[in-house]
Amino acid sequence: MDKRHGARHTLKRFPVIAKLTATLISVVVLVSSVAVGVLYDAGLKDKKQSLIALASDAAALIDTAVSIEARDETYNPRNEQEFSAVTIARDTFGELRGIGHSGSVLIAQRQGPDILVLFQQDFSEQAGKKNNGESENVVIDANAGLAKAIIAALHGKTGSILLKHNDSQVITAFAPIRSQGLAFVAMAQRQEFNAPFVAAIMNSLLFGIVLTAIGVYILYRQTVPVVERVQESENRFQGFADTATEWFWETGPNLRFRVMGKGGRLDGVDDRNRYLGLTRHDLTTEDTSTQKWRDHQEDMLQRRPFVNFQYEANLGGKIRTLSVTGLPFFDEKGEFKGYQGTGRDITDLTTHKHRIEEAEERLRRAFESITMSVIVIDEFGKIESFNPHSEKVFGYDKSEVIGKNISILMPEPDRGQHDQYIRNYVRGGQPAIIGIGREVTGLRKNGELFPMHLGVGEMILRGERHFVGSINDLSDAKALEQQLRRSQKMDAIGQLTGGIAHDFNNLLGIIIGNLDLMRSKLDEDDKNFQRIDRSIRAAERGAKLTSRLLSFSRQTPDANDPVNVNQTLRDLKDLVQRSITAEIEIELILDDNAGPAHINKSDFEDALINLSINAHDAMPNGGILTIETKRSRIDEHSTGTVLQVPTGDYLEVAVSDNGTGMTHEVINHIFEPFYTTKTDGKGTGLGMAMVYGFVKRSRGTISIYSELGVGTTIKLYLPYAPQHATGNIADATVDERIIRGGNETILIVDDEPDLAEIAATILGELGYECIVVFDAPAALSVLSNRRDIDLLMSDVIMPGMNGFELAGIATERMPSLKVLMTSGYTGNTSMKSISAGKNYPLLRKPYSNRDVAIEVRKALDASDFRES
């Protein structure tokens, strides 16, 4: 098994060894060839120069020798055809060997068109044996290669050429023998000159091969471990790349894929080579003109890395969501070569994420929309979650309490004991509220204490303990309970008073009857007559008191009929004016569509006169008495602010003054018989009791709103009589046309969070965007940050800055801002004195959904505010 493994490795290495050997041999051969070639060229040049020198010297020697012989008178040639130059050459070159072992020399002349060789000496041993320096005259064709050298010498030229002679390459040098007109030519065989260079090449090649073999062996021994490590690393990387949860990819400079790894999971994609040559723009199913794709393209054009770029792609016919990360890479010169990176299929992850986000969104919306205060804290009491209804209940913004201790929402002593209570519970103590719930006292941001029901649940998340508190604000329930208790108290007082008054009235009847009989028998001048007369008048006054008590205690009216309240008020205006001082101005604001009320007219007139007299007493220095009528609806949004009556349409009669106002203590007792705030002798304390009795007998209700130093508004809600209102009240279709919504933005400011929330709910259902705050500074902060507010709907009486002061600042900043005031007062009674000349529209409290919808729409559609 090990041998086979070694054989496989050897086979894998063989191509590398062969390539390396061939490369080194090629280098050796190339270097040797170049070196020998350079030497060969230099040697050949030297050889030519030496032959030229030899030829020149030989020609000069012959010229010199011939010249000497010509001056020697004893010289006698053997025959006429024999030149002295040939003789000299034969004698001179018989022993010449410098020209080489295979070289030769010759002397030639021109004879007609031919070349005649007069002398030729071959220096090879074989040639020497043949002619031993002797030569016959040889004729050479003028067109032969050797003839060119001879002709050049005959023309006086000296030089050398390579030519082919007797089927071999020869190096030929030529020079003229000027004195005889002959040509001297020296020739050397090129083969003889090449022999040492060929041997050198062969030796170099052999030596190079030996050195190459040694080098390959040494290099192989040194590089094989490196190669093996590289191959092992490459195999390991390939294995990782093929089995990783992400796949590797690479693009060229054109951003097209040229490598696509096999890692990751791509459903339905077996052959990833199909994507080579494509770009992400080719694969995606998304619109690549979006900002996301433009930013991605800009990153790549700027050669910036990118991380977790997500897009949808069509892979194998399936739409998959991919996440890719890439880095640019460059060559050693800094030239951009492309991108390398990884990718992963996050389709399932995205699907699960969307489901989780959807579930979280549903939970968040439920948490934010639940009409109950929900607060989550940790086991150390720090607030972690604070839903919007909690903001309304406690008056804090969520950002103000997150991370704070829950004890800030508690008064003492609960605040100081809370942390210890949690520690005791965590350590195993008995719970007092957790899992049980009870009624406790809460503390609002403005310092107001209020009753609430607190239920606390415990939950463990990832090993950490958390507590969830659910809170019901019991303020309205307690107020209704108090109103019901007051109503029951008044009913009990009425029953008691009625019984006593009935019996007392009978007694007064007996007393008056007897006194009248006694008086009839006496003269008018009799002192007893005067005493009896005074007693009878006192008894009659007592009878009137008992009559009032009986009127208070009656549970049903004598006779109820549809009454035109507007006309009745117009008729009573002069009578009321005479009942109060001239310093008090009476202002009637009557809604012509208010319609009739089903009441007893006489009782209504008595009630109105009593209310007017009380208003007069509250304005000793004069003022404005405003009486207003309108159609009003009492529903689930308004029953918390008036005594409980069936929901439906009512005729609202509001009597307002800008007098001294009343305290809550006075309001709590105002309807009780014989309760009065007037000095002794100036009031019986039955006026408001009579008004209360009238309203109750009429199956209506009454509401009081008062502020010390500002004024009082008393509203009578009288049963509406639609069956007799055909000429006065618009039908339901017209009313529906009047109630219109909109898409404007409304800033609601009211220090009563519940009333503000009711208004926001009503207006939100009509399409308006509502922003709710609870005091003037918060409203000014919103107006500073948002310039899209269309309407400021503000309460008049608020702690610190009142509504008119807020409206003045707001309209200075935003002249186009519309304003609608809300108040428990009615009409312009106290409004004019506070608003500094601005006659803003006013919505009276309590208001129904119809009232607030109509008044908001009127305020938004109004072109400008009238100066008063």
Image: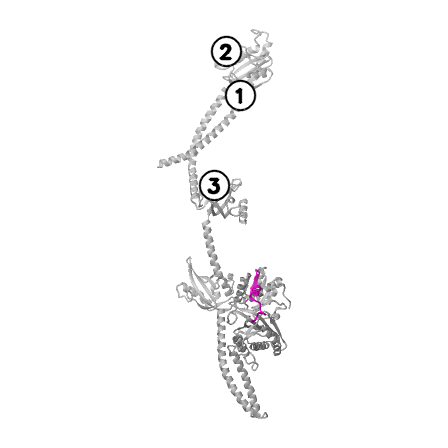
179 over 832 or under it: above or below: above
In the image shown, does 771 or 218 lie closer to the viewer?
771
CA gap, disc 2 and disc 1: 26 Å
CA gap, disc 3 and disc 2: 86 Å
- The magenta region covers 724-750
* Residue 402 appearing in the image: no
CA gap, disc 1 and disc 3: 68 Å
Residue holding disc 1: 47
Residue placed farthest to the right in the image?
Answer: 867
- Residue 216 quadrant: top left
Give the label on residue 131, or none: 2
* Between discs 2 and 1, the one toward the N terminus: 1
- Residue 823 quadrant: bottom right
Q: Secondary structure at mark 3?
A: helix
Q: Locate the C terminus by quadrant.
A: bottom right
197 over 741 or under it: above or below: above
Give the label on residue 274, or none: 3
Q: Amino acid at mark 2?
A: Asn
Q: Secondary structure at mark 1?
A: helix
215 over 511 or under it: above or below: above
* Between discs 3 and 2, the one toward the N terminus: 2
In the image shown, does 97 or 329 lie closer to the viewer?
329
So how many labels did they put on this image?
Answer: 3
Which residue is pictured at 47% across the width and 53% down the height?
Answer: 354
